[in-house]
Image (spheres, rainbow, N blue to C red):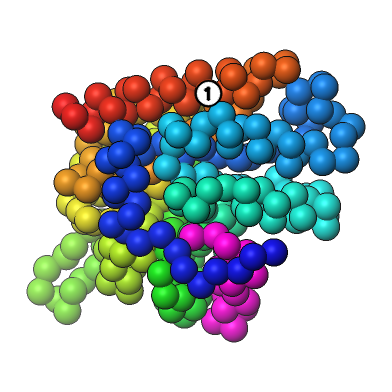
């Protein structure tokens, strides 16, 4: 496959958002069990489906996010489908590998190589739990983006992310903060707004204002609208910054809007609804 050492610069992403009046990211979480019946059983069903979705939505979105689990679960055939899909996404679009990787340094280096060099992703999602040496190898790739899990939409976010930390701060005073706040505050110093984004779930709308106080300039990747119930209005009201600073992801709500032969047309219709609403917030 074609390799590239370049990625989308922040200014290019911002320009795409302005031109398309959209900060929509379409999630290609292509579950083979949910494909339209007329595609099921075809040898290249996933790729055919993805290409149709891309063709139908590319003028309405600025990014595509591939949840790698839906491809890795199919073995080598799934990996091939993922590579073909990434290659088909236009260079004008920000390409995210939603892989949630991170490990000891030499392992993270190999993960970074897989997604940034072997494949042509612009960004990869990573988990912060193992600390700086597990994330640093991703940040060392020029013109690539590391997207760190910050505050997620799932119920389990309360197990760790919302735990309160209390620090002594050299006996001067006590400081209390949530674990996710500590993650955002600490990791934002390891990179910069040109190479570091954070995942914040759409269902955490009450926290967006606080998050913007901690990381005012970084882009946020926001999953959880659509089937998970997140409000695009609430997200936009509390999290837009001067550069937009948002990529709002919708997956199932768009790609599985229809299970018939009109799936691409219906996907476009839902994407258009999101884009139209986003245009209003960008110009509001």
Q: Main secondary structure of the magenta part?
A: helix
Front residue of 198 and 207: 198
- Looking at the image, can residue 165 be seen? no
For mark 1, what is the residue? Answer: 268
Q: Residue 11: x percent and y percent?
A: 28, 57
Asked if residue 124 is positioned above or below residue 154 in the image, the reply reads below
**Left or right, residue 38 beside residue 109:** right
* Residue 273 as seen in the image, left or right of residue 65: left
Residue numbers of the magenta segment: 104-122
User: If the image is split into quadrants, where does the N terminus sit?
Assistant: bottom right
Residue sitting at 49 percent across and 21 percent down?
Answer: 270
Instruction: Give the side of residue 216 with respect to residue 71, left or right.
Output: left
**Foreground residue, 124 or 158?**
124
Coordinates of residue 53 in the picture (x, y in percent): 61, 32
Q: Residues within 10 Å of mark 1 (few under 14, many from 20)?
A: many
- Residue at coordinates 40% horizontally, 47% vertically from top-left? 221
Front in this rendered view, residue 192 or 22: 22
Residue visible at 70% across and 52% down?
Answer: 84
Whether residue 83 is visible here, answered yes or no, is yes
**Tag 1 secondary structure:** helix
């Amino acid at each position: 496959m074609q390799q590239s050492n370049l990625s989308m610069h922040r200014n290019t992403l911002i320009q795409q958002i302005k031109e398309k009046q959209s900060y929509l990211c379409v999630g290609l979480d292509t579950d083979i069990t949910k494909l339209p019946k007329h595609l099921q059983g075809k040898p290249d069903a996933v790729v055919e489906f993805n290409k149709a979705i891309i063709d139908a939505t590319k003028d309405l979105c600025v990014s595509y996010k591939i949840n790698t689990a839906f491809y890795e679960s199919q073995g080598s055939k799934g990996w091939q489908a993922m590579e073909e899909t990434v290659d088909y996404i236009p260079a004008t679009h920000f390409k995210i590998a939603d892989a949630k990787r991170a490990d000891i340094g030499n392992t993270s280096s190999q993960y970074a190589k897989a997604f940034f060099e072997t494949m042509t992703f612009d960004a990869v999602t990573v988990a912060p739990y193992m600390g700086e040496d597990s994330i640093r190898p991703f940040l060392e790739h020029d013109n690539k983006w590391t997207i760190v899990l910050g505050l997620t939409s799932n119920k389990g976010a309360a197990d760790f992310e919302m735990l309160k930390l209390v620090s002594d701060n050299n006996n001067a005073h006590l400081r209390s903060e949530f674990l996710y706040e500590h993650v955002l505050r600490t990791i934002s110093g390891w990179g910069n707004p040109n190479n570091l984004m954070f995942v914040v779930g759409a269902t955490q709308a009450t926290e967006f204002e606080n998050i913007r106080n901690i990381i005012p300039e970084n882009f946020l990747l926001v999953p959880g609208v659509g089937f998970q119930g997140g409000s695009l209005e609430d997200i936009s009201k509390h999290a837009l910054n001067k550069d937009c600073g948002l990529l709002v992801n919708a997956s199932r709500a768009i790609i599985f809007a229809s299970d018939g032969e009109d799936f691409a047309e219906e996907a476009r219709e839902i994407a258009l609804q999101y884009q139209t609403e986003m245009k209003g917030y960008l110009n509001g």
